[in-house]
Amino acid sequence: MAEADTLLEVKDLRKYFPVGGFLSGTKGWVKAVDDINFSIARGETLGVVGESGCGKTTTAKLVLAAEPVTSGGILFEGKDIVGLKPKDLMEYRRKVQVVFQDPFSSLSPRLRVGEILAEPIVTHEHVSRTEVNRRVGELLELVGLRPDMDRLFPHEFSGGQRQRIAIARALATNAELIVLDEPVSALDVSIRAHIIGLLEDLQKDLGVSYLFIGHDLAAVAHISHRIAVMYLGKIVEVAESLELCENPLHPYTKALFAASLPSHPDEEREEIVLTGEVPSALNPPEGCRFHTRCPFIMPHCSEEIPELKEMSPGHWVSCYLY
Ligand SMILES: Nc1ncnc2c1ncn2[C@@H]1O[C@H](COP(=O)(O)OP(=O)(O)O)[C@@H](O)[C@H]1O
Ligand code: SF4
Ligand SMILES: [Mg+2]
């Protein structure tokens, strides 16, 4: 249910990509995102986790209004952005920004950092050049860089510094929600914690919300207040981070934990090892999407999709074991 301070609400969202040629007609559908629901409160970080191909980036693109939806709604501050006119969409794009995985390709190599950071301000606001320059300096300091670095080009920075610049760019127009699509996956392990720490500090200071996408459950749990676990276009479990870490219910979530955290000798965690590949999102398995890899499969698991059930306040799971 949407709460009073809900910033974003995604309702029954679907994205199907047609498969087939121009001449042969549509032969099937890649169900990249298949009827998902979630919400993000102001100042909250919602983590979305799952293996490659489960629909995380497609979800990000839908939320960013970078792809048309197949069906469903995306409510921002209570207003559906699906089908918005370009003028209203522009205002939405000011408030909802993105940081991509690869800080090398996401920043234009021909622009100086000062120009990269000025661009969104100039696009969305009518302010003087002096004010733009002041804001650029402020943004650089906010992400732990020096204001005089505005003269430099992206290639003069390290990967971690470039991701700081991408974060500064996302903040340039006072964004209320930032979609972070695997923002530290391409960085050296040694600098990941610094970027995560920066994101946490910025959230504390600015009250910005994050949709934090990743494939490593332990890492996503570290920064997120709540987590949605995705498998083949569906959300299979949602819970507060601590609750999910202490009491994962879905066999897939347990397997992700086993893959993410080295098991502790005195821990009584039930280990589930993921075997096999994720099936294709083109005509995915009937019933529970996880049934082809699940060690607990029962006869009806392959017949009907289990509904998400609330097992304890805020902890939802879609599995016939519960
Ligand atoms: N433009 C597209 N056309 C067809 N299939 C796509 C397109 N974009 C993504 N897909 C497919 O949708 C599924 C989900 O992809 P994606 O959202 O990128 O997953 P993730 O980010 O979790 O790795 C994959 O099977 C992918 O091949
Ligand atoms: S519904 Fe059945 S196949 Fe799916 S995760 Fe639960 S036990 Fe496994
Ligand atoms: Mg992706």
Image: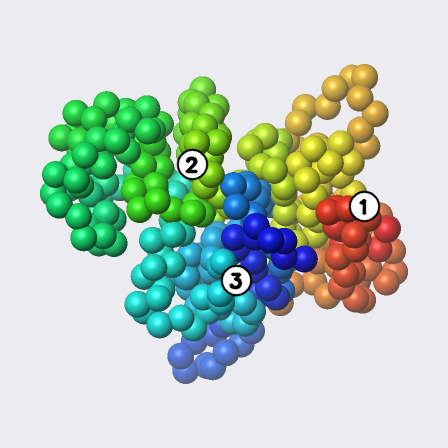
Disc 1 within 8 angstroms of ligand 2 (CB):
no
First in sequence: mark 3 or mark 2?
A: 3
> Residue 273 location in percent, x, y?
73, 37
Q: Return the residue nearer the eye: 186 or 285.
A: 186
| Category of crowding for the residue at label 2, using alpha-carbon neighbours closer than 10 angstroms: few (below 14), some (14–19), many (at least 20) | few
In the picture, the disc for residue 153 is none
103 in relation to 236, above or below: above
Q: Label for residue 78? A: 3
Query: In this figure, which residue is indicated by the disc labeled 2?
Result: 206
Residue 132 appears in view: yes
Who's the residue at 57% across and 50% down the image? 5
Residue at 40% of width from left, 79% of height from top? 22
Q: CA distance from mark 1 to mark 2?
A: 31 Å
**Left or right of 16: which side holds 65?**
left
Give the Cα separation between the discs numbered 3 and 1. Answer: 26 Å
Q: Identify residue for label 1.
A: 312
Looking at the rendering, which quadrant does residue 104 occupy? top left
CB atoms at circles 3 and 2 under 8 Å apart?
Answer: no
Q: Confirm or reject: label 3 Cβ below 8 Å from ligand 1.
A: no
Residue 19 screen position, x and y as percent: 49, 71
Image quadrant in which the N terminus is located: bottom right
